[in-house]
Image (spheres, rainbow, N blue to C red):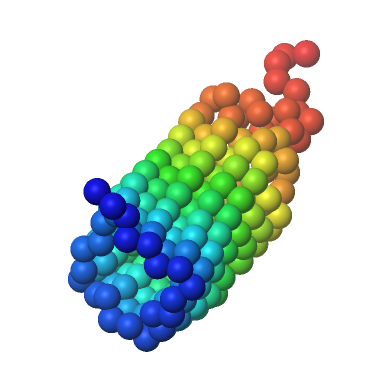
Amino acid sequence: MSVEVSTDERFDFADFSNEDWSEREYVGCSFVESDLSELRTRGVTFTDCDFSGANLSRSSHSASAFRNCHFERAHLNKVEMTDCSLLGTVITNSRVRPMTLIDCDLSLTSIGGVDLSGVVLRGCRLREANLSDSTLIGADLSGTDLTGVRAIGTKLGKADLRGARVDPMLWLQASVVDALVDAGQALEFAAAHGLRIGGE
């Protein structure tokens, strides 16, 4: 099956709501203020695309990619993604919750200062992502790869971190009050804070 490719095209203010897309590729395209609500994609790739002000609420995506894309003032609430890539994407001043991402790659993404309370990022890769000043209270981060994450001022209270790969710096940078961790992570937290475990 051939892939439909669009390069440097503008789809600003367009209405794509409730459509089904598959085997498409968009490179350097603009979707400013477009309506992509309830859009369903499978095998669709967006690279260097601008989604400023776009509405993707209640959309669902499988094996698709948003690489080095920009979401400013976007509506991403109730978005569902499975086995997708958001490598290098920047999300700012956007509404993103609730959101469910399963087994997705968010490496090198920038989601600093965004309210991600209660979102599901289960089994995702967030290597070297920027989560500084973001709020992930009650988020499900179980099984995620948080290696190299920037977490200065990040709030992880009541988040589920069980099974996540966590660098020692996260325990020092982020607030993890009431977070749910496994036994190994509890030992890592203690070591990061210079605590000694034992009777001596």
Q: Looking at the image, can residue 81 be seen? A: no
Residue 94 placed where, x, y %?
A: 49, 72
Q: Quadrant of residue 135?
A: bottom right
- Residue 1 left/right relative to 167: left
- Residue at the farthest front position: 2
Position of 46 with respect to 197 (left or right) is: left
Q: Image point 44% across, 61% down: which residue? A: 46
Question: Residue shown at 27%/75% (left/top)?
Answer: 16
Q: List the single residue furthest toward the top.
A: 200
Q: Residue furthest bottom?
A: 13
Using the image, determine if residue 111 lies above or below residue 167. Answer: below
Residue 130 falls in image quadrant:
bottom right
Check the image and report above or below for 105 versus 197: below
Point 46% across, 35% down: residue: 143
Percent position (x, y) of residue 28?
51, 68
Is residue 9 visible in this depiction of the protein?
A: yes
Provide residue 55's location: percent of width, then percent of height.
36, 76
Horizontally, is 42 left or right of 75 in the view? left
